[in-house]
Each structure stands twice: as C-alpha cells, then as structure tokens.
Image: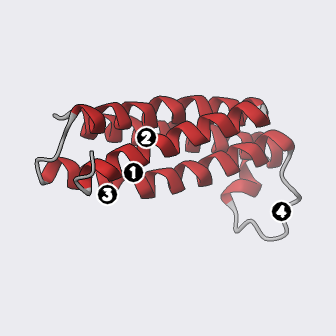
Amino acid sequence: MSTELTMLVYATALLIVIVLVQAVAGILANTLPVQAGNRHDLPPPKPFHGRASRAVANHIEGLAMFAPLAIVCVMTDMSTPMSVLGAQIFFYSRVAHALLYLIGIPWLRAVAWGAGMVGVFMVLLCVLGVM
C-alpha cells in the first residue's frame, strides 16, 4: 500500500480513537442512560467532553480534505516524494492536534492544525501537477 493511503488509514484509525474518547467523556459527564437516550435537553458539555467533541469535528473536516486527495494521488499514479511527505505531515500533525485539543493547549494546537493544512496543500499541489 502506498504511503499516502497508509497515512489515510492511520488518520481514520485516529478518528476512531478520538470518537471513542469523546463517547467515554460523554458517558462520564452525563451517565450512560442519558448518552444512550435521545439526548434531549442535555446540559452544556463539560470542558473535556466539549474539547473531545470539537476534536472529532475538526478531524472529520481534515479527513474530508485529505482523503479524496490521497485517493486521487494514488489512483492516478501521481505519488511523488512531496505527496508522501505531505501525507506524513498531515497524519502526524493531526495526532499532535488531537492530543493538544484534548489536553487543552490552544496555541500549539493551532500550529499543529496549520501543519496539517500544509500537508494537505502539498498533496493537492502534487495532484494538480504543480509539484
């Protein structure tokens, strides 16, 4: 499997982990019966649960940009050292972003997010034939 697709699989696995963390945080904050119910009139999320929920949403957004590019890159045989590096930057920065989001470190989290976007742009430029 190509590096770009491997990083996509790893990024998807990371999403699964973040979703599980968010689900457990919701259960701990609201109890299992409340979380398993219809979730009407939930109280505002506790800080960690809120950060976990936002980390999930943010990672889904990142995957929505990266996944099609990685797939197109590999399917059209446009993989280059630059697209490989971009995919690796995307994944590792998303790991850092998720951890920093869960811990609650805002400025470093923003740097990790920006690094992930650089990785996405690198793959995009390769798909467009610019790099």
Question: Nearer the N terminus, badge 2 or badge 4?
Answer: 4
Residue under label 2, please give it: 119
- Distance from the alpha carbon under mark 3 to that under mark 1: 6 Å
Query: Pointer 3 and pointer 1: residues touching (CB < 8 Å)?
Result: yes
Q: Quick one: quadrant of the C terminus?
A: top left
Res. 68 mark: 3
Q: Quadrant of residue 109?
A: top right
Residue at horizontal 74%, vertical 65%?
A: 39
Residue at horizontal 26%, vertical 48%?
A: 126
Residue under label 1, please give it: 66
Residue 38 versus residue 130 in the image, above or below: below
- Distance from the alpha carbon under mark 2 to that under mark 4: 37 Å
Query: Pointer 2 and pointer 1: residues touching (CB < 8 Å)?
Result: yes
Question: Nearer the N terminus, badge 2 or badge 1?
Answer: 1
- Disc 2 crowd rating (10 Å Cα; few below 14, some 14-19, many 20+) is many
Residue 49 versus residue 68 in the image, above or below: above
| Callout 2: SS | helix
